[in-house]
Image (cartoon, rainbow, N blue to C red):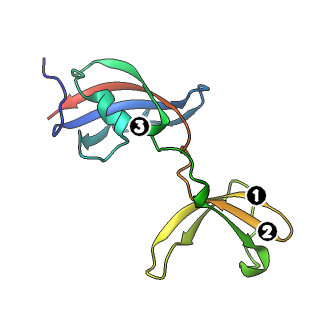
Amino acid sequence: MMQAKSGDNVRVHYTGKLTSGVVFDSSAGREPLEFTLGSGMVIAGFDSGITGMQVGEKKTVHIPVAEAYGPSDENLVFEFNRSDLPKDIPFEVGMQLNMHADGEGQVVPVTVTSVSEDKISVDANHPLAGQDLVFEIELVSVN
């Protein structure tokens, strides 16, 4: 049987979990995820976990922080004075917003992490940064 290798177009079903067992994403009920192995389209640990698999094979891959979304970076946590922000937005912890990162229109997704009467804190780290991840993977096809 053919083994998946770098450069192959692969299709996989997956369930992504935190080490606590909480599911954060799954292809269940959807089409398989399709991507080119080794192209950087997915996190490094997911990519390397599929390399060498055969069609129909299922396995569980444990991905450390460094091969997932990396460690959480304190430099990506920002605090703003509430008086400098629009008055019509009802800020809540967990709310997802888009922040303009530079004068060239680049938009960065952020999560509100704290809200007080005079300050708002947001985190621009990927929501899974700083987390070890576990993926249950089934290789559906290799082209």
- The crowding category of the residue bearing disc 3, from other C-alpha atoms within 10 Å (few below 14, some 14 to 19, many at least 20), is some
Q: Is residue 78 above or below residue 88?
A: above
**What amino acid type is highlighted by mark number 2?**
Lys
Q: Left or right: 59 with respect to 106?
A: left
User: What residue is at 71 percent from the left and 62 percent from the top?
Assistant: 121
Q: Residue 72 placed where, x, y %?
A: 57, 48
Cα separation, mark 3 vs mark 1, equals 28 Å
Image quarter for residue 95?
bottom right
Q: Residue 37 placed where, x, y %?
A: 23, 39
- In this rendered view, identify the residue nearer to me: 130 or 88: 130
Q: Left or right: 34 with respect to 109?
A: left
Identify the secondary structure beneath mark 1. Answer: strand
Return the residue at label 3.
Answer: 67
Return the residue at label 1.
Answer: 114
Question: Mark 3 or mark 2: which comes first in sequence?
Answer: 3
- In this rendered view, identify the residue nearer to me: 103 or 143: 103
**What amino acid type is highlighted by mark number 3?**
Glu
Quadrant that contains the C terminus: top left
Q: Which mark is residue 119?
A: 2
- In this rendered view, identify the residue nearer to me: 114 or 142: 114
Instruction: Look at the numbered discs 3 and 2 and tell me whether their residues touch, using CB distance below 8 Å.
Output: no
**What amino acid type is highlighted by mark number 1?**
Ser
Identify the secondary structure beneath mark 2. Answer: strand
Q: Which mark is residue 124?
A: none
Cα separation, mark 2 vs mark 1, equals 8 Å
Q: Residue 38 placed where, x, y %?
A: 23, 41
Q: Is residue 75 above or below residue 119?
A: above
